[in-house]
Amino acid sequence: MTVATSHPDNYTSIYRHIYDRFADDATFLWLLRSIAVNQAHYTNQDLITLDERVDKQLDGLLTAPEESWAICSAALELRQAGEVFAAAVLAFRSLEAYKIQAVVETALTSDQACKGLISAMAWLPGRLVHSWIKKFLTSKELDHKYLALAACSARREDPKDFLATILHRDDCIAHKKLYARALRLIGELKRFDLLHAVRIALVSDDEDIRFWANWSGILLGDKSLAQNLQPYVLTQNAHRRRAMAVCFRVLPLDESRNWISLLAKDPANIRLVISSTAILGDPDAVNWLIAKMRTPAITRLVGEAFTTITGIDLVEHKLALEELPDLENLLPENNEQDEDVELNEDEHLPFPDVDKIAAVWQKYQQRFTPAQRYFMGQAVTASTTTIEHLHRIFATGHQRQRAMAAMELALLEPAQFLLNHAAKGLSE
C-alpha cells in the first residue's frame, strides 16, 4: 500500500473554499465599511470594530498567500472596488512588484476600481506603501502621480515638494483629474505656500478645476471665494454637497439664509434645504424644522438637523417614537446623480416625537442666541471651548457629525488640516 504524501499546493487546494470565503468576506466588509463611514448610526468605535473584522479576513488570506493571490487576482477581472482593495492589500504585503503592477493596471481602468486601490494604500502601514507612493510621484505616468496624490489625501500625508512640482508642470496641469486632486490636496493639508496655484486655477475653464480651487482657497482662509460657489450650491452637479458644506459655514448669516431661500423655491430641493439648515446651524430655523417634522417622508432627516443644531439627541432624551410608523411608500428616493448621497440615508435615523420635541424646544430655546451659528449645541466661535467641543465630537460622535466637526475645525483654525473622518479607525 502506498501512502500519499502531502504537498503544500495540495494542502491549500483542499482548503480552497476557506480562502474563497476570506476573500468574499473581506470584499463584503470593505463595501459595508465604505457605506458606514457616512452613516448616522456609526461612531468611530464602531468603525474600529468593523476595521478589525476586515483585518481578520485579510490576515486569514495571508495564511496561504499564493492561494489567496490566485483567488484575489482572478477577482480583479470584475474591476470592482472591494475586489481591488483585497487584491491590493495582498500585493503590497507580498512586496512583489508584479502583483502590485497587476493591481495598479486594473485600478486605472475605472474610477470605481481606483477607489479600492486608494483605500488599500490608505489602509496599510506606511512601511509598505511609502516607497510606492514615492515611485508613483516620480513616475513618468501621470495616472501614477494621481494615485500617489490620492493616497496622500486619504492618509493626510504631505507630498511636500512633489506637490509643488506637479502644480508647475504643464503636462500635469493638462491632466485634469491629476490637477484637480492636487488643488484639493492644497486645502486638505493647508499648504499656504501654494496659494498662488489656487489663484491661477480660479479662472480655469473646467468646472471641476474651478471648484477645487475655490474650495481650497476657502479652507486657506479666503472666505470671499464662497461667492464663486453659488452655482455649485444652487444647481445639480457632482460638487453640490461639498459646496454647501463650506459655503453655509463661511457666508454671512443673512446671505446664507438668502441662498437657502433660493434653494427652497424648488420643492424638489427640500432635502437639500434641510441639510443646508443643519450646516448653517441657525437656531432661528428650529421652529421651522419642528413644523417640517410632521411631513413623514422627511421627518427623520429633519430630526437629524434638529440634533445637529441643538445637540439634543432624540434617543438619549426619549424624544423619538417608540412605535415606528409604516412609511414604506414614503421613504426618500435619493438622486442617483448625486455621488455624495448614499441610498437610504435616513434608514438608521430615529423617528422624532414632534410634540415632545416642540415642548422641549419651547423650554430651552432661550439658551440659544439669535444670529449665532451652533453645532451640536455649542456656539461656533474661535474660542478654546468651541475647539475642544469640536475635537470631542470628532472623537466620539457619529460619522456624519464627525465629518461636520472636521470641516468646522479646518475652517476655524488656520493650522488645522482637514481631518479624515473616513480614515481607518485606531483604538487608543
Image (spheres, grey):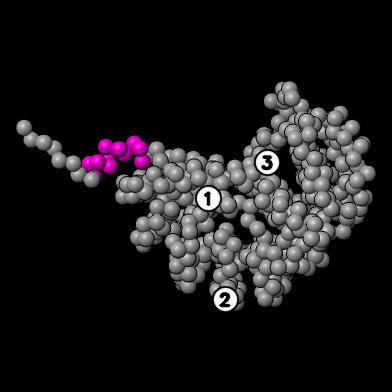
Question: Which is more toward the observer, 5 or 386?
Answer: 386
Tag of residue 103: none
The residue furthest left is 1
Q: Is residue 35 above or below residue 97?
A: above
Q: Secondary structure at mark 1?
A: helix
Do we see residue 295 in this rendering? Answer: no
Residue type at the position of mark 2 = Asp
Residue 190 lies left or right of residue 362; in this view the side is left
Residue identified by numbered label 1 = 112
Instruction: For marks 2 and 3, give the one nearer the viewer.
Output: 3
Distance from Cα at disc 2 to Cα at disc 3? 38 Å
Q: Secondary structure at mark 2?
A: helix
Distance from Cα at disc 3 to Cα at disc 1? 24 Å
Instruction: For marks 3 and 1, give the one nearer the viewer.
Output: 3
Tag of residue 40: 3
Q: Position of residue 140 (x, y in %)?
A: 46, 72
Task: Say whether disc 2 or disc 1 marks the residue closer to the N-terminus.
Answer: 1
Task: Say whether disc 2 or disc 3 marks the residue closer to the N-terminus.
Answer: 3
Q: Residues within 10 Å of mark 2 (few under 14, many from 20)?
A: few
**Residue at 64% in and 66% down:** 189
Task: Say whether disc 3 or disc 1 marks the residue closer to the N-terminus.
Answer: 3
Residue type at the position of mark 1 = Gln
Question: Which is more toward the observer, 300 or 271?
Answer: 300
Q: Is residue 325 above or below residue 257?
A: above
* Extent of the magenta region: 9-19
Q: Secondary structure at mark 3?
A: loop
Residue type at the position of mark 3 = Ala
* CB under 8 Å between discs 3 and 1: no
Residue identified by numbered label 2 = 161
